[in-house]
Image (cartoon, rainbow, N blue to C red):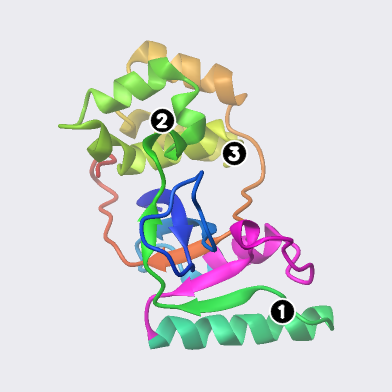
Amino acid sequence: MIATRVGYAGGSTQDPTYYDIADHTEAIEIVYDGGRLSIDTLLELFWQGHDPTRPAFKDQYRKALFAENQEQLALFERSVARQQARLGQTISTELIYRAPFYAAEDDHQKWFLRRHPQLFAEIVAHYPTEDHAVLSTAAARLNGYLGGSGNPDQLERDIDRMGLSEGGRSYLRKSTGGGRGPTELMMLAAFGGSYYDDEPYSC
């Protein structure tokens, strides 16, 4: 996983906001390296993170996959068909093609990380602007661990590459219990990207 942003997609209006979301859906944009993380793995997490047979009660919480191109759309269609066959029920998760993604307001980005001002400040200090920091791999990883994803082994592999001080690393270990918990994704919008394993995490 390289970077993530939360936002809104799938609706008919331009520039939605949290308080004026109209018919858009809350979504997550994921930038990943397809050579290291397959879209099939992301889809497995997506299906584990929600009940695809239960219709959403409003557009804001609609279950959806947002396809950027025909190849993704075909892949998503096959994934839905497999889930329907496995469950033996109708899938309510929607497939939406080429929907614009609108980034959510700043206070919604890296929500878990922002609840730890010490760590957030350390990450921001490494980048020209807060926006660059929010889009960094380090921020995405920190936000995930603080939200309950990952495990202790993953955290220890990552922690020295996040640019944290010794105090920041100690604080992170204490705040996450060493890194434990399931990954749950309610929405998925998949995009391409690149990542170099021998460098510190960056935007």
Q: Tell whether position 58 is magenta.
A: yes
Residue 134 quadrant: top left
Comparing 71 with 13, the one in front is: 13
Left or right placement of residue 52 versus residue 153 in this view: right
Q: Secondary structure at mark 2?
A: helix
Q: Is residue 31 visible?
A: no
Mark 3 — residue?
151
Does dot 1 land on a helix, a strand or a loop?
Answer: helix
Number of other residues with Cα within 10 Å of mark 2, as a class: few under 14, some 14 to 19, many 20 or more = some
The residues tagged by marks 3 and 1 sit, at their Cα atoms, a distance apart of 27 Å
**Residue pointed to by mark 1:** 83
**Which of the two discs, 3 and 1, sits closer to the camera?**
1
Q: Tell us which disc is closer to us: 2 or 1.
A: 1
Tell me which residue sits at (39%, 11%) in the image: 167
Figure check: 64 above or below 91: above
Where residue 71 sits in the image (x, y, percent)?
41, 86
Neighbor class of circle 1 (other Cα within 10 Å; few <14, some 14-19, many 20+) is some
Task: Name the residue located 51 percent from the left edge and 40 percent from the top edge.
Answer: 144
What amino acid is labelled 2 in the image?
Ile
Q: Earlier in the sequence, mark 2 or mark 3?
A: 3
As rendered, which of 39 and 57 lies closer to the eye?
Answer: 57
Q: Quadrant of the C terminus?
A: top left
Give percent across and percent down for residue 4. 40, 50
Range shown magenta:
42-69
- Of all residues shown, which one is farthest toward the left? 128
Looking at the image, is mark 2 or mark 1 earlier in the sequence?
Answer: 1
User: Distance of mark 2 from mark 3, alpha carbons?
Assistant: 12 Å
**Residue 14 x %, y %:** 37, 62
Q: Which residue is mark 2?
A: 159
